[in-house]
Amino acid sequence: MKAAKVMNLDFSEAFFRSLSGLQPADVELALREYCGVEFDLNEFNRSSAQHWRSHVQANGIETKHGFPELLEFFD
């Protein structure tokens, strides 16, 4: 969402959530369809990666509920 704002794009919450869990090629296809032919996918990817790294540096990555138990099960 931050990368979209930087590029003056207005992603609806529904569209943003629809990208979750998709393969990268499918995300790119959805972005191109949603944003149009002039959408700069390279710039979006660069900005998105930069925002993600900043977020992870500041907040870390939350472990999903149940993951430690799953690891213990496999051990």
Image (cartoon, rainbow, N blue to C red):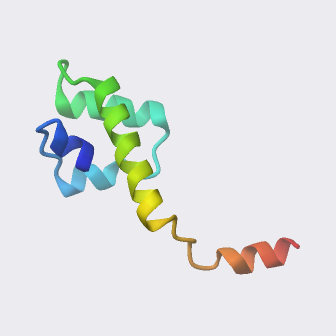
Answer left or right for 39 relative to 63. left
Q: Position of residue 2 (x, y in %)?
A: 24, 49
Locate the C terminus and report the quarter of the image it occupies.
Answer: bottom right
Q: Is residue 29 above or below residue 49?
A: above
Q: Nearer the viewer, residue 16 or 54?
A: 54
Residue at position x 26%, y 43% from top? 3
Q: Which residue is painted at 12% across and 45% down in the image?
A: 10
Residue 24 horizontal/vertical position (percent) = 47, 35
Which picture quadrant has residue 31?
A: top left
In the rendered image, the vertical position of residue 23 relative to residue 20, given as above or below: above
Q: Position of residue 48 (x, y in %)?
A: 34, 41
Residue shown at the point (39%, 53%) measured from the top left: 54
Who is closer to the viewer here, 48 or 39? 48
Q: Residue furthest top?
A: 37
Q: Residue 45: percent from the left, percent from the top?
A: 36, 33
* Residue at (49, 39) in percent of width and height: 23
The mark tally for this picture is 0
